[in-house]
């Protein structure tokens, strides 16, 4: 599924846990199962489990998409990488998403909450599941393939409200160099550019595509390489997260390594 259903990611998390057994995300409009079961299961079984869930008086629960599950990652935490107050007892484990992999029809995306990254695996693998439902409709409900608006050298995403550098520079940077490049960028008469966070950069990943896994019309000539994010590993200096636009996987690396960067504002 395309990523247009997600909105509000630039803002800090804001959770309402007043309803028993559920967590409402005021930013994204999603309602989450607060505590998960102890059973690991295949994606097909996870899909059935969420469809049968009766929680909070609601019966429209489902397996979250990749970007929906990424939205509740807390990149400043590890083991698990989540808000422990809002989601108590969360195991630092693999959790299924409903997003299919472009690499293989037998694979789907999961998010690893040990330290927080999205990746793909066989649908028959046994992972956890945290069900979700849409409590508030997203801000953008139009054509999922038409949420980018190209203007000059930048691209506005009407689904998230973010504005992106359209064509990336033809060089790589270390972590500090990437931050300096974005801070000094003067593009379309704007000077407030920065390196995106991991959840923000993940909104550009198109799971239906690979090499590169992005909308090539909106973002032409995007190399299928690693791109820096501003998210530090465990909220500590020395390591930061990057997203690979060959397939959309994310992992962390030392500041000294050199990768691409696409600035955002």
Image (tube, rainbow, N blue to C red):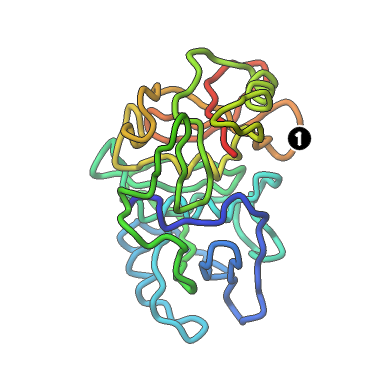
Residue placed farthest to the top in the image?
171
Report the residue marked by disc 1: 236
Q: Nearer the viewer, residue 129 or 214?
A: 214
Q: Residue at x 54, y 43 (%)?
A: 200
Where disc 1 sits, the SS reads loop
Q: Nearer the viewer, residue 93 or 236?
A: 236
Q: Residue at x 60, y 67 (%)?
A: 26
> In the rendered view, would you say 22 is above or below 198?
below
User: Where's residue 57, x and y in %?
Assistant: 48, 86
Q: Residue at x 58, y 77 (%)?
A: 21
User: Where's residue 176, x and y in %?
Assistant: 70, 21
Q: Quadrant of the C terminus?
A: top right
Disc 1 crowd rating (10 Å Cα; few below 14, some 14-19, many 20+) is: few
> In the rendered view, would you say 102 is above or below 239?
below
- Left or right of residue 38: residue 253: right
Residue placed farthest to the right in the image?
237
> In the rendered view, would you say 234 is above or below 173?
below
Residue placed farthest to the front in the image?
189
- Left or right of residue 37: residue 148: left
Q: Nearer the viewer, residue 93 or 73?
A: 73
> In the rendered view, would you say 70 is above or below 194?
below
Dividing the picture into quadrants, the one containing residue 211 is: top left
User: Where's residue 119, x and y in %?
Assistant: 44, 40
Q: Residue at x 35, y 27 (%)?
A: 220
User: Where's residue 169, x and y in %?
Assistant: 50, 18
Give the mark count.
1
Residue placed farthest to the bottom in the image?
57
């Amino acid at each position: 599924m395309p990523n247009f259903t997600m909105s509000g990611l630039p803002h800090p998390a804001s959770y309402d846990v007043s309803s028993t057994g559920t967590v409402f995300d005021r930013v994204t409009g999603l309602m989450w199962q607060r505590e998960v079961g102890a059973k690991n299961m295949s994606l097909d079984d996870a899909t059935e489990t969420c469809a049968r869930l009766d929680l909070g008086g609601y019966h429209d629960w489902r397996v979250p998409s990749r970007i929906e599950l990424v939205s509740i990652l807390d990149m400043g935490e590890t083991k698990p990488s989540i808000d422990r107050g809002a989601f108590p007892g969360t195991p630092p484990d693999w959790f299924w998403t409903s997003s299919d992999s472009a690499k293989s029809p037998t694979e789907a995306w999961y998010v690893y909450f040990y330290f927080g990254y999205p990746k793909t695996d066989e649908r028959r693998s046994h992972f956890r599941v945290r069900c979700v439902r849409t409590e508030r409709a997203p801000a953008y409900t139009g054509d999922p393939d038409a949420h980018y608006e190209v203007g000059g050298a930048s691209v506005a995403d009407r689904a998230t409200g973010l504005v992106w550098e359209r064509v990336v520079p033809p060089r790589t940077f270390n972590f500090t160099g990437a931050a300096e490049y974005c801070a000094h960028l003067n593009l379309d008469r704007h000077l407030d550019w920065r390196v995106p966070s991991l959840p923000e950069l993940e909104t550009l990943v198109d799971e239906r595509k690979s090499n590169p896994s992005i909308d090539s019309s909106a973002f032409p000539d995007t190399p299928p390489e690693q791109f820096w994010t501003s998210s530090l590993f465990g909220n500590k200096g020395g390591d930061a997260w990057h997203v690979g636009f060959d397939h959309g996987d994310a992992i962390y690396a030392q500041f000294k390594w050199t990768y691409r960067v696409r600035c955002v504002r």
